[in-house]
Amino acid sequence: MLDEPSLSRQWVARRLQRALSVERWCGPLREGFARSPSKTGEILRTHGASAADRALRLESLIREIGGEPYGSWGLGAKTARFGARLVPLLSLGLTRRAARLVAEHTLSEYEALDAIVQDAPGIDSTLSEAIEPMGTQVASELEELGASGDD
């Protein structure tokens, strides 16, 4: 990666912001998918709340490394939530598949973030320790979605 710690911090801040944007967009998607009256709907309501909590934690981490999180909400989050509410009306199988894709994408962001943070000079190891539980939580959410196919 970059040898200069100040440049390294900028790259880490960008990856944190990217993870934050994913949480800000995917949380409302999960909330929209939660309209499903099945066990999957209950699971996704919980996942939507977890995404909001992770977004707050990511905002705080960005500030801790000297950055300022920028807005990535806009009208899009409301539109995403509304559009996602239509999916359960079409098909429960489609809802499950879309929810799994959202969880897979979120997990890939945390994996990429963790890889960059671990290799970045000038970044305190506590940042990696703070990110790891969030990635683990997303991985367990993905597992939970895989197991919810029997409702």
Image (cartoon, grey):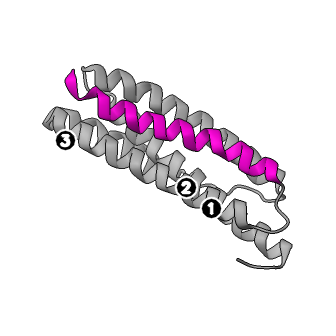
Instruction: Give the spatial CA distance, label 3 vs label 1.
Output: 32 Å
Query: Looking at the rendered structure, which numbered label has been put on residue 151?
Result: none
Q: Residues within 10 Å of mark 2 (few under 14, many from 20)?
A: some
Nearer the observer: mark 3 or 1; the answer is 1
Identify which residue is drawn at 75% across, 48% down: 61
Identify which residue is drawn at 44% across, 34% down: 141
Tag 1 near tag 2, CB within 8 Å: yes
Residue that numbered label 2 is attached to: 111
Indicate left or right for 126 with 104 as reference: right
Q: Quadrant of residue 147?
A: top left
Classify 3 as above or below 118: below
State whether residue 17 appears in this view: no
**Dot 3 or dot 2, earlier in sequence:** 3
Identify which residue is drawn at 75% across, 67% down: 120
**Dot 3 or dot 1, earlier in sequence:** 3
Residue that numbered label 3 is attached to: 94
Residue 82 in the image, given as x and y percentages of width and height: 33, 40
Residue that numbered label 1 is attached to: 115
Classify 140 as above or below 111: above
Q: Residues within 10 Å of mark 3 (few under 14, many from 20)?
A: some
Q: Quadrant of residue 114?
A: bottom right
Residue 142 in the image, given as x and y percentages of width and height: 40, 38
Q: Residues within 10 Å of mark 1 (few under 14, many from 20)?
A: few
Secondary structure under tag 2 reads helix
Residue type at the position of mark 2: Glu
Instruction: Give the spatial CA distance, label 1 vs label 2.
Output: 6 Å
Secondary structure under tag 3 reads helix
- Over which residues does the magenta segment extend? 125-151
